[in-house]
Amino acid sequence: MGFCLFNNVAITTSFLLNERLELGINKVLIVDWDVHHGNGTQKMFWKDPRVLFFSVHRYEFGSFYPASDDGSHIMVGEGPGAGYNINVPWENARCGDADYFAVWDHVLIPVAKEFSPDMIIISAGFDAAIGDPLGGCRVTPYGYSVMLKKLMEFARGKIVMALEGGYNLDSLANSVLACVEVLLEDKPIAGSSEVYPFESTWRVIKAVREELSAFWPTLADELPKKLPFRKTLPIQAMIFLPDRPYLHSLEETIRGFVAAGPCGDTLPVKHPNDFVTGVGSSSSPSTSVIPPSPVPPSDDAAYWKGFLVCKVNTPFLDAIKEAHPKTFKHFNVETPTIQLLYLNTILGYIKSYSNICISDLDARATREFRRVFRNFCKVGIDISWLEKRFDSCVARHSSISLFNWVKEVSSRRTNVLKEVQAMTAQLVELEQERAKKEGTFLEIEAEERKLMEECRGIEALLGGYK
């Protein structure tokens, strides 16, 4: 269900198991790593023990699309298929490589060993990739390549990948490329800087293992009592100061930016420089130090990842790009004509809680952003998430006016909708009154016709006496 008319994976699986018996494929493992729950595939093989269906997806207690209880971890199958349906429902967005690796290592891989599939088919949606405007998760191309590599150990490497979701062209292309390189085994897999999953990830893993332990003995083993985790993603802010006179106003912006984070600590600005960097996390106080030199050490550059940077270019950006060539993005918003794709990508990054850096937005760039937001309103897309996140994602004084404008547009749109609803109600009342009046007129006309007929009858009767 969703944007698909035909479930290619389910049709292929059914064809292999029921129509091509000579191939000797008796058990199929379906891995659905698309960010949405594979409810259609689940329903098709709900009672079929020949198919082990595994779906890892955003669930958020049933509020995320397709917004039903079907994606819950307690939905394990029925009858002979009981235990062959595995749902791993994320409690929140922003899950990344470490979260998926933990699920692979502690749920999918152990069960796959017991199941011993003859074929693996992957519902390869890449809308959980970092930067995707719909998924909101943070899986990197490296993450997808590792997940695929782990699955290649089964079914003698017989794997089919069916391309599904993915709504950021860059994220989609990079993720698909990484998987193809793994399938061809012609390029080593690069490393990832993400180490620990979220605490909620361990909570979900424990719940899934407990629910399925009666069907899969390998899941009955207890997990270690002390599990390393990260409570929240680190806040990473980079604010460029190309104009020294703006230092004071930007200092206030910086303080507001960090205060909007989970720590709420202020950001001390000690002296002006070409740029300011700030890093904060929930496990340690939020601090910031202005580097004594224009270019921080390469280790610092390696820490920064997934940035969206606009207009300004410094040696530090070159260091980040060198450390993260696939995840670093540089968008130039200085020109008056900005590609709509870039703006949609920017919105996708903001909506996905990615690390954002937008710097030195001028009046022309602001107008372009406003144009996009106006188009969002025209098609009825909810932009309320911008009100909540824009002020903490866009670190520049010009973003304040833009943020206020977004709130104004959203409020204006709400008022317009109320006015339209009121006008619609008035039209309905007028229509009812008109219909009532027309009904009265029709009754009068019918009465007149009846009287005229009676008159004609009387005249005819009188005429007979002449």
Image: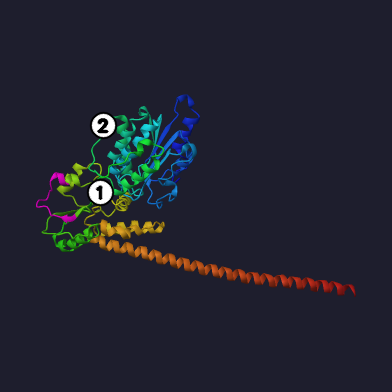
Q: Residue furthest left?
A: 292
User: On the rendered image, what quadrant is the C terminus found in?
Assistant: bottom right
Q: Where is residue 185 shown, x and y percent of the image?
A: 29, 29
Residue at horizontal 39 percent and vertical 64 percent from the top:
413
User: On the rendered image, what quadrant is the N terminus found in?
Assistant: top left
Task: Estimate how packed mark 1 is, as few (under 14), some (14 to 19) or many (20 or more) residues with alpha carbons within 10 Å.
Answer: some
69 relative to 169 in the view: left or right: right
Task: Check disc 2 and report the residue beneath it.
Answer: 187
Q: Nearer the viewer, residue 195 or 427?
A: 195
Q: Nearer the viewer, residue 48 or 460?
A: 48
Q: Residue furthest right?
A: 465
Residue 113 visible in the snapshot: yes
Q: Where is residue 83 shown, x and y percent of the image?
A: 43, 39
338 relative to 28 in the view: left or right: left
Residue 318 visible in the snapshot: no
Type of amino acid under label 1? Arg
Residue at horizontal 40 percent and vertical 31 percent from the top:
117
On residue 230, which mark appears? 1
Disc nearer the start of the sequence (1/2): 2
Q: SS of the residue at dot 2?
A: loop
Q: Nearer the viewer, mark 1 or mark 2?
A: 1
Is-magenta flag for residue 328?
Answer: no
Q: Nearer the viewer, residue 86 or 449?
A: 86
Q: Quadrant of residue 56?
A: top left
Is-magenta flag for residue 299?
Answer: yes
Task: Estimate how packed mark 2 is, as few (under 14), some (14 to 19) or many (20 or more) residues with alpha carbons within 10 Å.
Answer: few
Is residue 14 positioned above or below 2 on the image?
above
Question: Magenta region: which residues?
Answer: 285-300
For the residues marked 1 and 2, what is the alpha-carbon distance in whole angstroms?
31 Å
Q: Where is residue 137 shown, x and y percent of the image?
A: 32, 47
Q: Quadrant of residue 141?
A: top left
Type of amino acid under label 2? Lys
